[in-house]
Amino acid sequence: MTVRRVKGRESEARNAQLLVLLTDRRQELLSQIRRSLAERQEEFQSRDAPGSHGWGAAPEGSLTLAVVQQQEQQLAQIDAAIGRHKVGTYGRCVSCNEEIALARLRALPFAQRCAECQEEWEEQKERPAS
């Protein structure tokens, strides 16, 4: 067996593992979003109940919506990562084209850059334009 075949199998196994990670995270986010929206709906219903004194207008309702928006943003990032997986670019840094560390992808499955390039990108983004 050649080195190329072994590396190809390792890469296939890595890609399969990453796809499972992405789809699991996607399902988890969908469940969280549904649960948060159901809780929000319950808040609205309790606000309209006699003697509730406007509970649904409490600041907690805004927090729930903010959390749902953040979860929806992550869901969009996961969907984009699944799209990159389908075309074979997922797991490769968009800046240097090197493989992103598996540990980084486990922690942040929609990462588009390796840790080093991400740090450089964030520094450049924070610098004022000259």
Image (tube, rainbow, N blue to C red):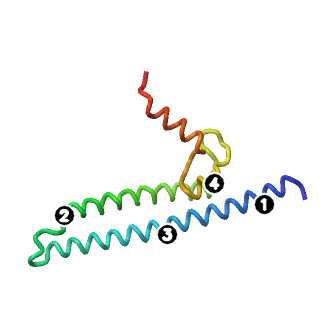
Measured in 3D between alpha carbons, the distance from the residue under mark 2 to the one under mark 3, in whole angstroms, is 29 Å
Q: Identify the mark at residue 9; answer none if there is no mark.
A: 1
Residue 108 place in picture, x, y as percent? 54, 55
Q: Identify the mark at residue 28; answer none if there is no mark.
A: none
To which residue does mark 2 refer?
58
**Is mark 4 in CB contact (under 8 Å) with mark 2?**
no
Residue 115 picture quarter: top right
| Amino acid bearing label 3 | Gln
Precedes in sequence: disc 3 or disc 1: 1
- Within 10 Å of the Cα at label 4, are there few (<14), some (14-19), or many (20+) other Cα atoms? few
Q: Nearer the viewer, residue 59 or 94?
A: 59
Precedes in sequence: disc 1 or disc 4: 1
| Amino acid bearing label 4 | Val
Q: How many marks?
A: 4
Measured in 3D between alpha carbons, the distance from the residue under mark 4 to the one under mark 2, in whole angstroms, is 45 Å
Precedes in sequence: disc 1 or disc 2: 1
